[in-house]
Every structure is written in structure tokens, then in C-alpha cells.
Amino acid sequence: MFEQLRDALRGLGRDAGPTDRRAALAGMKDALVHARMALHDLREGVTVTERRLTGERAELDTVTRRRGLAEQINDAETVEIAERFVAQHAERVRVLEQKRAAQLDELALAEREYDAMSRELKRAMAGIPLGAAGGPGSHEAAAMREVEEALGERQATADEAALDAMARARTREAREADAAERLAALKRQLGKES
């Protein structure tokens, strides 16, 4: 996810002229915006998985309850069918739990990488050499605060605009898909009535 940003950081590490440095910093900012959008997508993926997991758990509870009711009335055939569904939903719950755990691990890793890259960008914008040992001195700390304030304001605006555009596009796609499905259902219904 952060390869573009790492390449830009490496480019700053060499003896780069002012023009190259500005271009590298611009590339780093752009890469951070893309990385933030990717983090948003990862978080959204976790939310979708959690929603599916909640639904599967509800289904598992339902088929387990139905199996219990069938056992109470000694309906062997229904018990057998219910046991298949219990096993199926239990397996789905297990897989979704593993998927959610993997997604949460991936998200945590990506957030740590994003934070590290963001700090490196701020240091580079403040003119602090990459890989400089120790914490910044008082002059460097002041420069970093100024950069963080300026970058934070610009980053928030750019990120909000990008996320808004993505949300609008997804909403539009969902509406178009819903309209297409309704049209197909209407066509099927009219085809049956003819």
C-alpha cells in the first residue's frame, strides 16, 4: 500500500535539488492521500465483515433453535436437515471470525505504516534529514509543528474531498444497481403476466 510513498522517501534521501525535492514532497503528499483512502476502505471492509458475521450468528441461532424444536417433537428428518444447516452456519461464522481478525490485523499494520510515513513526510517538509538520529531540537520541533499544522489543514481538506467523491460514486453505483435490479424484476414480472 505504501510503496509509492517509500519510493518518494528514498528519492529525498539522495542529494536532490530543490525542484526534485518539491516533486518528491508532492508525490509523498499524494501517496499519503491515497494511503488514507486505502485505510478508509480497510475500515469499511471490517464493517462489512462484522455485519455479515452478525447476520450469520443470527442465522446460526435460528437454525439451532429450530433443531431444538424438532428434537422436542421427535421429528428426525427435520433434526437431520437442521443439523446440516447448523454445521453450515457454524462454519461460516468461524470463517468470518477469522476474516475479521485478519482484517483487523491488516488495518492495524496499515495504520502504523501510515503514521510512520506521515511522520517522515512531516520531517522532510520541515527540512529535517531522513533518518536523523534522536528527536528534533527546539528549532526543528517548531518547524515540524508549523508543517504539521499546515499539512493537517490541507490534508484534511484533500482527504474529505476525496472521500466525499468516493462516497458519492459508491452511492450512485448502488442506486444504479438497485434501479437495474428493479427494472429486471419488473421485466420478469411483465414477462410472466404476458
Image (spheres, helix red, strand yellow):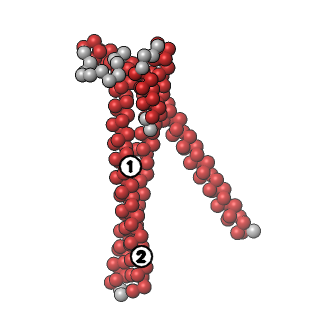
For label 1, the SS is helix
Q: Residue 57 occupies which quadrant of the picture?
A: bottom left
**Residue 187 visible here:** yes
- In the picture shown, does residue 91 fall above or below 45? below
Residue name at image x 35 percent, y 22 percent: 130
Q: Check disc 1 and give the amino acid type.
A: Gln
Q: Check disc 2 and give the amino acid type.
A: Arg
Q: Earlier in the sequence, mark 2 or mark 1?
A: 2
Marks 2/1: CA distance? Answer: 28 Å
- In the picture shown, does residue 68 fall above or below 26? below
* Mark nearer the viewer, 2 or 1: 1
The extreme right residue here reads 194
User: Relative to the observer, which residue lies in front, 117 or 37?
Assistant: 117
For label 2, the SS is helix
What residue would you read off at disc 1?
103
Q: What percent of the width, then of the height, locates residue 143?
A: 32, 15
Image disc number at residue 84: 2
